[in-house]
Amino acid sequence: MIVRDFLDWVRTAPASQRAEATSALERAYLYSDLSAHDAAAAEGAMLMLLDDASPLVRRALADSLAASPSAPPAIMLALAADQPQIAAPVLALSPLLVDADLVEAVATGGGVVQAAVASRAGLPRAVAAAIAEVGTAESCLVLLENPDADLAVFSIDRIAERYGHLAAIREELLARADVAAATRLTLVAKLSDTLAGFVAERQWLDPDHAQRVAREACEKATLVLAAEAPMPQMRPLVHHLRASGQLTGGLVLRALLCGNIALFEEALSELTEMPVERVSRLVHDGGNTGLHALFGQAGLPPSTYPAFKEAIGAMREGGFDSEPGGGARLKRRMIERVLTRCEDEMPGEVEPLLTLLRRFATEAAREEARLFCDELVAEACRDEQSEAA
């Protein structure tokens, strides 16, 4: 009887009052001890309200029923296919929607729908993959911020590929512990390209200069990532560098002059398609003949071979491991030795190589000076603390 009176009243009531009455009806359905007949009548009334012309009424339906496992499934499916603002709470909360429903919503819905799905607690991997593949930037950001989302590695890579140029998404990705070194490098490259374009557009540097600065910054970041990456990630990182055109002679030489032998050997292994163990033997134990053959098979610029030969000779002799910075910073004494030998033995013949080595030497000197000054400041702070104590 009550439901029949409601149906008579709802035909002429204002939209705002219909929405309030709809919420009351849903609360009665979910939480009151209705008879089977009254419950069926209430469900029928809610089904009728799906056709209400006012979105306020349908949104009231969605808000009240969204999180309930006892809501009528037919009503939830209908609401999930309604206007985005009405579907959003259902897609974000309803436990009655299965993975296929959510994937379809992601594929056919817009940004509001996709963001609602991305915010779900315990978001399954398949649904997360759909958002990573076709979702808007906003929905991908919501997905990355969702601590309960099951994100596969390939989904993270896909988001980085699609939206790594956006600062908010890039920061979320870089803050994650499960992002591979190769993906981090992709993000660094996107940031570098963005900054280089911005600097060139503002005419602060000419485009060629801006691109060179950006490239060198990427190379530095690569060495930092490689120094921190676990060994199982080294091969995928090097493969990514080659596939993206970043595995250049300059980068390989920088790795060697930083003392990052693991990256250097993996790079030669990738370029020569030889096992890394064989490359390592040739680097450490082979003579100049074997080294020259290895270098030629790698396809590196012939003009850079003298620097590689001298750097490997210095590495074999040792004595450079004590320099600060680990495998992420250029070793100043090694660079100066290589530069001196190349200038003495081949003056004028390898000027581009000498220019590169001089830039490396300047960079190493500046970095060493920064470290020295930082240590002086830290020492002064320790002295002040000791005196205060």
Image (cartoon, rainbow, N blue to C red):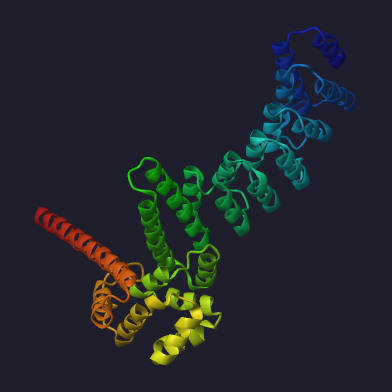
Q: Residue visible at 71% across and 11% down?
A: 17
Q: Nearer the viewer, residue 241 or 112?
A: 241
Horizontal placement of 63 versus 372: left or right?
A: right
Residue 180's place in the image compared with 207, above or below, is: below
Q: Is residue 320 visible?
A: yes
- The foreground one among 385 and 207 is 207
Residue 285 appears in the rendering:
no
Question: Which of the 4 quarters of the picture holds residue 300?
Answer: bottom left
> Residue 385 versus residue 338: which sits nearer the camera?
338
Report x, y in % for residue 335. Answer: 27, 74
Furthest residue toward front: 348
Rendered residue at 63%/49% (across/down): 132
Residue 308, how many percent across, how many down? 36, 79
Residue 285 position within the rendered picture, expressed as x and y whole percent measured from the top left: 40, 91
Looking at the figure, which quarter contains the N terminus? top right
Name the side, left or right, on which 216 lies relative to 51. Answer: left
Indicate the quadrant where residue 22 lies.
Answer: top right
Quadrant in the rendering for residue 120: top right
